[in-house]
Amino acid sequence: MDLPLIFACVAAGAVGLYVLADGFDLGIGLLFLLAPREQDRDVMMESIAPLWDGNETWLVFGGALLWTAFPIAYYVLLPAFYLPLMIMLFALIFRGIAFEFRFQARQFRRVWDYAFAGGSLLAVLAQGLVLGGFIGGVPVENGVFSGGTFSCLTVLGLLCAGGLVGGYALLGAGWLIWKTDGRTQMFGRKIGHAAVILTAACMALVSGWTAFTVPEVAERWFGWPRVLQLAPMPLAATVAVLLIWRALWGSSQSRPFVLTIVLFLLGFGGLAVSLWPYVVPRHATVWSAASDGATLRFVGVGMLVILPIILGYLGHAYWVFRGKTVLEGGYGTPDAEGDAGRRAAARRTDLHSSWSVRQPDAAPIAKGANPDD
Amino acid sequence: MDATTLSRIQFGFTIGFHILWPAFTIGIASFVAFLSFMWWRTENPIYGSLMRFWIRIFALGFGMGVVTGVVLSYEIGTNWSGFSRAVNNVLGPFFMYEVMTAFFLEAGFIGIVLFGEKRVGRGMHFFACLMVALGTLFSASWILASNSWMQTPAGYSVGADGVFHVVDWWAAVFNPSFPYRFLHMVCASYLTGSFVVAGVSAYHLWRGQHINAAREGFSLALWAALVLAPLQVVLGDAQGRNTLEYQPTKLAAMEGLWDSGDGVPATLIGWPDMTAEKNRYEIAIPHIGSVYLTHSWDGHVQGLKAVPPADRPYVPLVFFAFRIMVGCGLVLLAMAVTGGVLRWRGRLFTTRWFQLAGLATTPLGFVAVIAGWTVTETGRQPYVVYGLLRTPDAASPIAAGSVLVSLLLFVVVYNVLLLAFFWYGARIVMRGPEDVSAVNPNAVRPGLEQAGPAVLRRFPTKRPAMAGE
C-alpha cells in the first residue's frame, strides 16, 4: 500500500475542506463592513457563529498532518513563510475572539466589527502570500530554508491574495444567499457580482503569470499532447464562472454556493496538476518527504476510524443549525436581544415595557420551542 | 539577543498565556456538563440558570484558548524547525490524535452548547456539553503525553542524522512521567476551576445578589475543592518522586540542592548562586528534604554538582517558581479545609470574611499552574528533549529581527485580549445568572423557598402561559 500517496490525498482533502469551510466564514468577514445595516451584520455573524470553530480546526489539522506525514514541508516552509504566517495568526486571533466579544459588547461593538472584518481580510491576504510563495517555490540549501524574511512578497503572492479575497467573498456571498433572506440576502446577491469579477480576473492572471514565470509549470500545461487532456479544466472553470453569474439572481438559493465550491475545486485541481508530485515545490516529492512508515501506519489506523466520526458530527452540527438564520441573540444575553438600535441606558429602565415583558419569553424554558416554527 | 533566545521567550510567553485558558476551561467544561445533567434530570431552574451563566463565561475562555492554541501549532514549525525535524515521527502523531480526538470534538459540539439549547432537547444539550468536556480532557492527555515524552523519552531510537524513530508506541505514549503529569495537571485545572466558581459565587453572596444560584455554586465549588486540594498534594508528591527518579537535575534545581548526599535538608528559602554553586541567605531544615522526597530519614538525593555546569538549568527560576506553586497550593488547601469546617458548623453562606477570602484566592489556581509549568519547562533546560536534544539545535534559521517584532506584537496583542476578557468577563459576572423569577415568575414562593428543598419538591414548578399562546 502506498502510504505517502494516501496521506498526500488526505492532506489535499483537508486543505480543500479548510479552504471551503473557513472560506465562507472568512468571506463573511470580508463582506462584514460592506453590509448596509447593523442588523445584516448581526445576522451574518449569527449564521456562522456556531460553525466557525469547526471550520478553523481544519487549519490546525492541516498543520499537524503536514508535520506528521511530510515533515520537510513543515520545517522548511513554515520558517520560509514566517512573516505571512504570523500575520495570519494575529489576524485569526482578532477575528476569532471578535465572535465572543462582539456578542457581549455594547458601546465598543464597532471595535469588534473592525477586528472581525480586518482580521478576516488580513488572514486571507496572508494565505494568498503563502499560496503564491508555495507555487513560486522557496530557496532551500542543505535541507533548510535559506531565504530572507520578505522573500515571500512576490507578484504571484499578491495576485493569489487578490484571487483568494475574491473567491472567499464569493463563497461568503453564496452562503448569505443560501442561509439568510430579505435584505441581507439581497446584499449577498449584489456583492456577489463584484466577487465573481475579482475571482475570475485573478484566477486568469495567476494562471497566466505562473505559466510565464515558472517554466516547469508551463511545460506541464502546454506540453503536447497533454494540453489536449488538460484543456477541459480551464474551460470548465470559465463555464462555472458564467453559471455563477447567472445563478446570483436565479431562483435556487443554494446554487451560487454550490457552483462556487465547484469553481474552487477546479482551481484546486489546476494547482495539483501544476505542482504534483512535490510537497516542497521542485525540491521534495510526496515520497521523498514522507516520514517513517511506522508513523504513517500509526496515524493512518486512527484516521480511518476517527475521520468518518468527525465528519459525521460536524455534519450533525450543520444539520442542527439548518435553515435560514434567525436572530436569537448570541448566548441568550438580554443585551443582544435584537434591539441594537435602542440605547442601553433606556433599556435598563423599566420604561420600555415591551422589553421587560419579552424578557421571560427570551428565557429558554420550553424545550422544543423551535424558532423555525 | 539571538533568534534562539527570542524564540524561547516568545514560545514561553505564548504557551504560558495559552495554558491559562485550558486550565480554566477543563474545569468549567466539566462543571457545565454537570449542571446540564442536573438541569436535564431534576428540572430545577437554579441549575438551568447557573448552567447558562457559566456557559457565557466558558465561551469567552474557550474562544481565548482556541485562538491562542492555533498560534502554537504553527510556532513549532516557524520557530523550532530543528525540533520539528528531529521529533516529527514521535510527536507528530500525538498532535494528529489530539486534533482528531479533541479539537474536532470540542469544535463540533461547542456550537450546540452555546447556541443550540433551544434547538435540541435537554438530553442532547447535555450530551454536547459532555462531549466538549471530554474533548478538553482528551486534549490534555495528548498534549501531556507529548510534553512528558520530551521530559522522559521512551520507546524510541535515534538515527545517525539525529532524527528520532519510534520502536514502541505504547512506551512512547505512556512514558514514565505521563500518568503523573496528566493527573497533576487535570487536578490542577479542576482545582483552578472550582476556585473561579467559588470566587464568582462569593462575589454574589457578598453583594447579596442572585442568592439561590450563588449558594448552589459556592457549595458545589467548595465540595469539589475539599476533595481536590488534598488529592493534589498526594499527586504532587508522586510527581516529585517521579522527577527525582528520571530528572534528578531538575529536582535538585527545584530544591536548591547543590551537593549529593543522604538525609538532605529541605531549603525553605534562599538565593541559589549559580557561580558560587551554593545558596545564599539560606534557611533549611535538616533531613526533611529526604523525608518528603524519598519517604525515608536518610534517603539519597542527587545534587546539582553531579552534572557539569553546562547541563544545568537556570536554578533561581526553577527554585522560586516551585516555591510559588507550592505556596499557592497550600493556601488553596487551607481555603478548602476552612470551607469544610464552616460548612460543618452551618456558617458556609453567612461568613463574610470567608467570602472575601474566596474572592482573593480566585487567581491563585492560575498562578500555581503558570509557576508549575515554569518549573517543569525551565527545569528541563538546556535540553528540549531531556538529555538528547539541546535547545540551540532545535531552533529555526530565521532572523532575530522578525522574531523580536512578532514577540513584541504578541505581548501587546495578548495583553489587549486579556484586558478585553476581564472587561467582558466582569460584566457577565456582575450581571449574574438570570434570576429564577425571570425564567418562571410562578417559581418564586418566598415561604416555600425558606422551608427547604424537602417541602419545595412537593410543589413542582410549572411554566406560566405566555400571552399570545
Image (cartoon, helix red, strand yellow):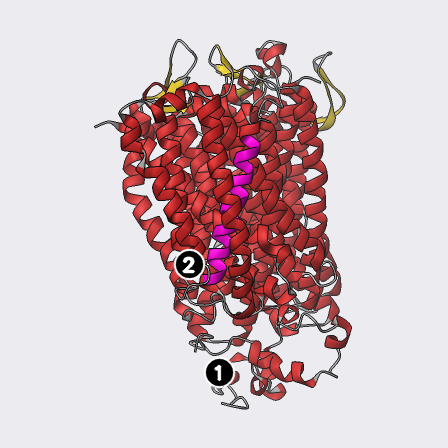
x, y percentage for residue A208? 46, 30
Identify the residue at horizontal 51%, vertical 47% (top origin): A197
Q: State whether the magenta stretch is mostly helix, strand or loop.
A: helix
Dot in front, 1 or 2: 2
Q: Find numbered disc 2 in the image and state the secondary structure of the residue it sits on.
A: helix
Asked whether A43 or B220 is in front, the reply is A43
Mark 1 residue crowding within 10 angstroms, few (<14) / some (14–19) / many (20+): few
Whether A159 is among the magenta residues is yes
Q: Does residue B230 appear in the picture of this structure?
A: yes
Residue A247: mark: 2
Residue B457: mark: 1
Q: Is residue B53 left or right of residue B357?
A: left
Say which chain tag 1 marks: B
Bounds of the magenta segment: A157-177
Residue B171: mark: none
Q: Find numbered disc 1 in the image and state the secondary structure of the residue it sits on.
A: loop
Quarter-of-image position of residue B340: bottom right
Query: Looking at numbered disc 2 in the image, what kind of residue is underneath it?
Result: Ala
Number of disc labels: 2
Identify the residue at horizontal 64%, vertical 63% (top origin): A36
